[in-house]
Amino acid sequence: MTEKAFQDHYPDDMSHCYGCGRLNDYGHQIKSYWDGEESVCTYTPSLYHTAIPGFVYGGLIAALIDCHSTGTAAAARYRSENREMGSEPVLRFVTGSLNVKYLKPTPIDGPLELRSKVKEIKGKKVVVETELSAKGQVCATGEVVAVEIPESMMPKA
């Protein structure tokens, strides 16, 4: 893809998240993009993401759903305000709640695809529904209530 990922628009002082921070060398550094009205992210797990040999650890699945969904929430709010991502004032979201349903074991030997739809935008809250698939099979679903980052968490200049 030639467009910048949602996460690439985050300012440097807000780009350290373990799941999506581009400046966290030890993190997952996921990348999310618009695909029409859905957002999409592809992530290839490593063998150290193993739960049982051949299958992905559930914590990774939850983290991917979480960070892809909060990135989607930010992008959706920018879109709803007809603003370019990253424009001031910066919109950044954190998790208010995360509900993951594990539907079937997720194979580790290939890329995982996450697809999200925005269910609701209401003030500082965005509700996002996400499916995680492997080899064309939906393995997990999640719903994230993302909330605009509170002032108390904003980096101090």
Image (spheres, grey):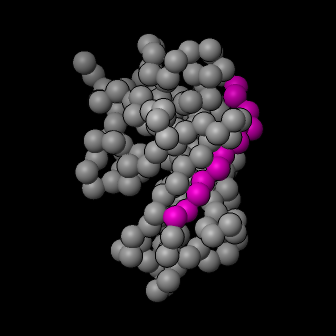
Q: Residue furthest right?
A: 119
**What residue appears at the point 60 percent right and 36 percent down from the top-left corner?**
34
Q: Residue furthest bottom?
A: 53
Q: State the image coordinates of residue 92 (x, y, percent, origin top left).
A: 47, 29
Q: State the image coordinates of residue 43 (x, y, percent, origin top left).
A: 48, 58
Figure check: 79 above or below 5: above
Numbered label tally: 0
Please say whether residue 119 is one of the residues in the magenta stretch.
yes
The answer to whether residue 20 shows anywhere in this view is yes
Dominant secondary structure of the residues highlighted in magenta in the image: strand
Which of the pair 75/90 is nearer the observer? 75
Q: Tell me if 111 is positioned left or right of 124 in this view.
A: left
**What residue appears at the point 27 percent right and 55 percent down from the top-left corner?**
26
**What residue appears at the point 63 percent right and 15 percent down from the top-left corner?**
81
Quadrant for residue 152, please give it: top left
Q: Which residues are magenta?
A: 111-122
